[in-house]
Amino acid sequence: MKMKSYVWLLAFSAILVFQRCSDDDGGKTASSVVTGVLVANEGNFLAANASVTYYNPEKDSSAQNIFRNAAGDFAGDVLQSITLDGDRAYLVLNGSNTIEVANSTTFAREKTVAEPILDKPQYVSIINDKAYISVWGPYDADYNLTSSAIVVADAKTMTITDTIPTRPGVGELFYAGGYLFASINNFGAAHVVSIIDPSKNEVIRDIAVTPGPAGMVLDANNRVWVICRGAYDAEESYLESFDVKNTVQVQIHLDFRAGADLAVSPDGKTLYLTGGNNIYSMPVDSKEAPAAPLFTAEDVTDLYSFGVNPENGDFYVGDARLFSASGEVYVYASDGTAKTSFATGVGPTQFIFKK
């Protein structure tokens, strides 16, 4: 279960897999994903019902279970993230401790990667034909993470070639300016963004930030921004930024608990973030937090994920519905006007926009 929820140890008893108004009910025809939006659905913890939804904005149509339809079964337990690279999709299952490699158009399974070192994997970043995989690693007897790392593999064969040790709780990965940035979150207890040099496969610097770093984006000024949610149950968060050479840092206080997802407008000049059901916008040159939300997603019960379409600036808001039923995604125009909604699998956790 993803770090944004801080509920890794909670199991949800209701396992309801049903969809509203979709083109595919999960058992018949595989969908062809050419362009559009993919939704990674975590599924219920320990239920192994993680799934992928495909939404076509041009047709306003959705298809459920596209991996299951092509592969013959669910992706596994807790789909943390999906990374696309050319004709491949990498599905990271941090409950199953596996990575499913699929064709990015048909979603037919190509390979299941299950290695002992992939203990609670989180995210994948593909750089120069190498797969960088953030891995929490094992717990000790007191449920403390003991040996987190970024595991390096050949992106084509998924043969593991190297391991880069990190501080406990490595999570989201973001590649910019020749460096790989890694949020070290550790359930809100950590306060570091590590900088990895892919040419050396080593951490070259740790940047101290406020606790709970999560999502990262690059703005039009070539600065990396990270949302720092705060420690567990914090009531305030921070936005922090630095350039890709790590020399300039900006810190903006937020008087609310922010969500883990950070997004940027297509032109790179505006940041978007969430707090509760509110969506906030902030110019990247601002030195102050937004005074009021851009709009409120009033139909959402449990705002669990957020993304911005890099083509047209539309907002995508994932409603997990407390994991008691299948999820729902609400789509808004860049001014906050509601456009449409569509059903997903259980726990919509990430949006992937495919050109």
Image (cartoon, rainbow, N blue to C red):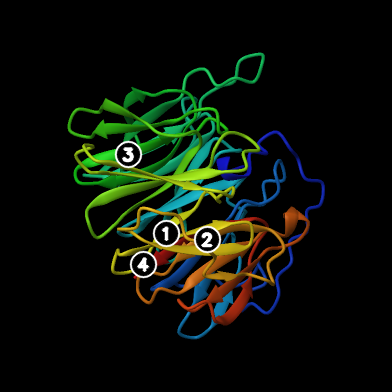
**Mark 1–mark 2 CB contact (< 8 Å):** yes
Question: Mark 4 or mark 3: which comes first in sequence?
Answer: 3
**Mark 2–mark 4 CB contact (< 8 Å):** no
Q: Is residue 19 left or right of residue 187?
A: right
**Mark 4–mark 1 CB contact (< 8 Å):** yes
Three-letter residue code for mark 3: Phe
The answer to whether residue 140 is above or below residue 103 is above
Q: Is residue 220 left or right of residue 145?
A: left
Query: Residue at horizontal 68%, vertical 57%?
Result: 346
What secondary structure is marked by label 4? loop
Pointer 4 residue: 265
What secondary structure is marked by label 3? strand
Residue 181's label in the rendered image is: 3
Label 2 – label 3 distance at C-alpha? 20 Å
Query: Residue at horizontal 55%, vertical 75%?
Result: 331
Image quadrant occupied by the N terminus: top right
Label 1 – label 2 distance at C-alpha? 8 Å
Q: Is residue 275 left or right of residue 16?
A: left
Label 4 – label 3 distance at C-alpha? 20 Å
**Mark 2–mark 3 CB contact (< 8 Å):** no
Pointer 1 residue: 263
Label 2 – label 4 distance at C-alpha? 13 Å
Label 4 – label 1 distance at C-alpha? 7 Å
